[in-house]
Amino acid sequence: MARMTMIEAIRSAQHVAMGRDDNIVVFGEDVGYFGGVFRCTQGLQETYGPSRCFDSPINESGIIGAAIGMAAYGLRPCVEIQFADYMYPGYDQLSQEAARIRYRSDGDFTTQITVRMPTGGGIYGGQTHSQSPEALFAHVCGLKTVIPSNPYDAKGLLAASIEDDDPVIFLEPKRLYNGPFDGHHDRPITSWAKHSMGEVPEDYYTVPLGKAAITRPGDEVTILAYGTMVHVALTAAEETGIDAEVIDLRTILPLDLETIETSVKRTGRCVILHEATKTCGFGAELMSLVQETCFYHLEAPIARVTGWDTPYPHAQEWDYFPGPKRVGAALKKVMEG
Amino acid sequence: MARMTMIEAIRSAQHVAMGRDDNIVVFGEDVGYFGGVFRCTQGLQETYGPSRCFDSPINESGIIGAAIGMAAYGLRPCVEIQFADYMYPGYDQLSQEAARIRYRSDGDFTTQITVRMPTGGGIYGGQTHSQSPEALFAHVCGLKTVIPSNPYDAKGLLAASIEDDDPVIFLEPKRLYNGPFDGHHDRPITSWAKHSMGEVPEDYYTVPLGKAAITRPGDEVTILAYGTMVHVALTAAEETGIDAEVIDLRTILPLDLETIETSVKRTGRCVILHEATKTCGFGAELMSLVQETCFYHLEAPIARVTGWDTPYPHAQEWDYFPGPKRVGAALKKVMEG
Amino acid sequence: MTKPLKFYVPEPEFRPGDQPDFSGLKLPEAGAVARPKVNVKAENIRDLAYTIIRVMTREGEAVGDWAGALSDDEALVGLKNMIKVRAYDKRMQMAQRQGKTSFYVQCLGEEAIACAFQQALEKGDMNFPTYRQQGLLLSSGYPVLDMMNQVYSNSEDPLRGRQLPIMYSSKEYGFFSISGNLATQFIQAVGWAMASAIKGDTKIAAGWIGDGSTAESDFHSAMVFASTYRAPVVLNIVNNQWAISTFQGIARGGAATFAARGHGFGIPALRVDGNDFLAVYAVSKWAIERARKGYGPTLIEHVTYRAGAHSTSDDPAVYRPRKESEEWPLGDPIERLKTYLIKKGAWSEERHTQAEAEIEAEIVALQKEAEKNGTLASGQKPSPREMFEDVFKETPPHLRKQRQEAGL
Amino acid sequence: MTKPLKFYVPEPEFRPGDQPDFSGLKLPEAGAVARPKVNVKAENIRDLAYTIIRVMTREGEAVGDWAGALSDDEALVGLKNMIKVRAYDKRMQMAQRQGKTSFYVQCLGEEAIACAFQQALEKGDMNFPTYRQQGLLLSSGYPVLDMMNQVYSNSEDPLRGRQLPIMYSSKEYGFFSISGNLATQFIQAVGWAMASAIKGDTKIAAGWIGDGSTAESDFHSAMVFASTYRAPVVLNIVNNQWAISTFQGIARGGAATFAARGHGFGIPALRVDGNDFLAVYAVSKWAIERARKGYGPTLIEHVTYRAGAHSTSDDPAVYRPRKESEEWPLGDPIERLKTYLIKKGAWSEERHTQAEAEIEAEIVALQKEAEKNGTLASGQKPSPREMFEDVFKETPPHLRKQRQEAGL
Ligand SMILES: Cc1ncc(C[n+]2csc(CCOP(=O)(O)OP(=O)(O)O)c2C)c(N)n1
Ligand SMILES: Cc1ncc(C[n+]2csc(CCOP(=O)(O)OP(=O)(O)O)c2C)c(N)n1
Ligand SMILES: [Mg+2]
Ligand SMILES: [Mg+2]
């Protein structure tokens, strides 16, 4: 067992996977010699050579499109999009091709690709280095979407994603790369070395897709979160003293609705968190599902705390980010409701 | 006052607008000499010449990107994407550029463009001629999204969209182009000539964006719908004999939440319809908004009737389409709930 | 004072009402273009992007360097394949008119391209086609009955009714699932070819795209990736002069030819008479060999003419002269190959008439058989349950729930 | 038996640890390339895409057809602009290191390109830049103080803190809002130029893109639209050899040059020594005149070298030899123009040293002033309310509600 940052865990997942299956290839912008702008692929080219890990031209449609062709051949590409904000030029290939080829060909051709991309704000990245586009993947059927919140899960979920026979979008909350983030940007940074989920086996293991984790059991209210917001949820629970059950969704599609339903039916209250813009965000789907399945158990309106419906601003980043204060306020309101 | 199909109304809106403002230009695939594959731009090149209405290369990113540049110059482009299913290659330009330029430049540069696209199923178009991507526009802030359900609104809303100083996505339910559609594909087709909303003034008028219409007043339950589904809602109300209030949203962003809230608070029940896939569809947002604003007035869980979370199949089109039977069943269930 | 700028929009030479006249079109003589070695450097054959490689003379003789690639028997196979494609198209087009399916796309006049190319491929190579390359499938031995079942979306439809009629798919026959979204397949072909190279395989890929679709961005992705990684892929542009109602000049712009697009990527580019079966075969074989030997990608522009409508959804008489097709100078690919074979003594008018009749009868018989499985309008259909399958490998809980809700 | 295929991945010549040696790089002599008429046909100057237009000799003489485009006074303006850009970069880079802003991007070594180009433009023309063309703004007379206020995201930030530090925007100064998404501006430039032509205006547009970003699809969109509608636009590729850690060969692939990309579109393409101010000016002027006179688009590849890191977020020593920059044979643009002017007797070492000192002092003074308005780390900031403005022209109800919820 080693202590790893999330970056190291992601690296390790790819390293181990490539060692087990030589159909796995890694490519993307700057991922080869340099090892990626966040260094998540460092060492892979050195170990497995430039045929297995190489730099791509700056063309996201090309990256996904080529990966689809490779998957049709039988490879298992794991590609990096440098920031989730830059997946849009590849969105046609992702949502209309990768997601549809099994269906179109009655299972004859398949698209076992993993598309890794850093997501979320918190690093003063402005509107094009901070986005959380998970809802755009959830809405178009045929894609799985995974968002880890800690190094242990990151490695296990990435290994599972690479092994999965369907296209998987693997969103990496960049604010969590180096340490858990309690939502207070003005407090000292903590590192994964001091966090239990920073303990990561060096060998192969998987964390199954489609299963949520109960990060904090609680009785009074259920908080649904993923990625960075899991940590904000924990902070808010602690700060408000409200006994919240924090569910880390981990995979948003397929979703572990069973765990959610069980919890909300018990607590009768629910708060949903995400960093993405509110309108039509994944929170809307979660709220709908909870409303549909738990209506008669609800003691208060379900609440959402999300990014505002504006671009992610640069200087006002912390006014945009749905931090512990806003989450705490929502918790209190839901408790009163 | 003339009788017009929705195609003729859309043509007329552009014709009248171009006559009033010579900064309006129309371009897109096959829209020039031919007048568009659905003939919605017929006659415009003949009247206004090829500098004002012309064919574009088949490159949706290029169409939107060029329109953005033109708008920065001061023109007011109204462009056609041949099918909504083909907007994906232009999604980066739409969601990250058109939607963001006012914000990025503090209002110095603006993007007064209208992007017309046929949407929805019902013509055996299969998975790439039947999609309803409205949620993908609603989720990324900075775009307005309009979906008319009849010729009168289509003309007035399109005129208002073209005049609007923000980018507007104008989705045209292709199944309604030639006549209202009650949702029963196996019954004789009716034409707009026989429908009151087929009466369309030949001159200029607008229907304001952001205002819903109550298409059928009712007391027992509120149905939220837009485009083709408005007609299905009317059919279902009639067939079940349930006194539903049918709200035609017309603009989904900005949304007329006031009209929705007033209605649901009165009826205490709500059914939401759309053709798009369910997960993270615009119905999820509507359900969330109703839950948030009307929770204490709800007498039953809100229900959604939507397309399934599968690609739009070809042969099974009518098993996919959320027709009057499914809507009727949901109405009954909500009435019992 | 600077003069005001003017906006330029290219226009086709002829519109309805005009008398089409292609006498201005410079066509090189058959045999005029030399055949370079397959390992030639792109920069040494730039001229091949600005000419047209032709093998058959008007009189039906095969001349020049590019001649002689096919034996008479092989050419006869090609001729019969083209006849089969045309007969198939005719029947399916008619079936659509009769309401037995929703949609159909012919390749009338373009049969030589896909048929000759497929004949030059080897088993295990993979095509990434558009909707107008039925000739690839029909020449590869894929069962015609299966194609018909799909066109009819009937109970035996190999794609279970999910896809549009003509959007075939078959891994076994080297035919990648057709997409409705133009050009996406071009870069996918390059990715497949890269994979073949990564694995040290000997298989190559072929991408297909229309003249109009070269304007799409994925054309660029494909060119960039193919160029950078020297992928073993043949990139085919079928320039049939039209993209629905839009003439090729809108996509081509100020370039002299589509083939010239290759030069900016250091990819060798050849232009070939797409209605000359022998020329298409020879050029395809050259490019395929080049790819397989590790010399990298080739861009081929097949010059042809879309003799029919774009699809069953449009009437070309609205946007181009009715006679344009007849006036088009490259002639009919079937007629031309027939003339060649007759001239060589390997074929005759009588055998041709007989072959046409036989093939048509075969197609009609298969059609009857297919219709026993139903058509889109009537009879058995794929189960609605199929709608929920293959979205994912295993149906996840939310889809199982929806399937239940649908009562399926 | 066919040999197995091999996968090819291009590699840069030198990596950390290697001794960079550019003696193999063929550089044409200054003055060697003839200057065609501005209405020349693209096909008649294809060679200009495979050479490098240079004006200044090593000794600082301006020679050949392309010389003489600038008076000494004008060249001096250019020199001072370049000094200003470098001084500005130095201070802002330092400010970032001091934590006063989040991010900065220098253009060290590339100053000649934007400065010379801007000087060749006319008022009313519009640039669609990338993040490395601060030289355009600084040469256009845009207030440096405003730029600094934006870099600091302070209370006087003209973009109200919404944008990343270096993503300037100014309609008045012909500088379109910079996007974080690479290449999108290239086609937007073409659209702007089309609009100018549609309206019978005399203004032209200029698009800017990096070597790495030419691989993006919007490069293709821009080329297709510019070619088809003969748009009055100058399309500039700044080939500074690197795209973050990726050498230019990955984007360029098998093409000899980026300029060659123009040939597939019939767009004239010129390659110029981007560190030779006089050459960049002359070539830019040529292309701008061509566009304004209605002869359509031009593609220019400016050959230069990114002497600094990609941005404040990376360390180039990890992926290229530390000395590569020094060994790069095109020299420093400021030094070269200075040598030329001194040789002509229009400038001296002393005046140069003095000018550098004056300009630095001016920048430092402005910086102090800017810091009075705050920095990202401290002091006044744009109001959080600004976050909700300009999403739409008028704030719609749902955003008003959210603003309220935010207590703003
Ligand atoms: C992304 C996308 N945009 C638009 C369309 C609509 N469309 C279908 S076919 C076609 C014309 C294609 O012309 P071309 O590439 O020349 O092929 P051809 O039909 O002549 O074989 C168009 C515009 C589409 N299918 N996909
Ligand atoms: C669509 C998109 N993909 C990726 C990136 C990340 N990115 C920012 S700059 C850059 C390198 C660009 O290199 P080049 O075009 O050569 O310009 P240079 O930085 O050398 O001036 C990359 C990959 C981005 N900003 N946008
Ligand atoms: Mg065509
Ligand atoms: Mg660069």
Image (spheres, coloured by chain):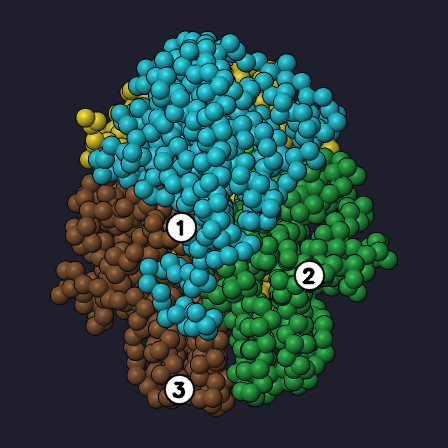
Chain colours: A green, B brown, C yellow, D cyan
Is label 2 in contact with label 3 (beta carbons under 8 Å)? no
In the rendered structure, which amino acid carries the disc numbered 1? Pro
User: Is residue A217 depicted above or below C165 in this figure?
Assistant: below
Q: Taking the image as drawn, is residue B38 in sight?
A: no
Q: Is mark 2 on a helix, strand or loop?
A: loop
**Residue A188: which disc?**
2
Q: Mark 3 lies on which chain?
A: B
Query: Looking at the figure, which quarter contains the C terminus of chain C?
Result: bottom right
Give the residue displayed 43% in from the left and 29% down from the top: D81
In the rendered structure, which amino acid carries the disc numbered 2? Pro
In the image, which is nearer the foreground, mark 3 or mark 1? Answer: 1
Q: Is mark 3 on a helix, strand or loop?
A: helix
Q: Mark 1 lies on which chain?
A: D
Distance between mark 2 and mark 3 Cα atoms: 48 Å
Query: Percent x, y for residue D385?
Result: 42, 64
- The residue that mark 1 highlights is D158
Distance between mark 3 and mark 1 Cα atoms: 45 Å
- The residue that mark 3 highlights is B265
Is label 3 in contact with label 1 (beta carbons under 8 Å)? no
Pointer 3 residue Cβ closer than 8 Å to ligand 1: no
In the rendered structure, which amino acid carries the disc numbered 3? Lys
Give the residue displayed 57% in from the left and 72% down from the top: A325
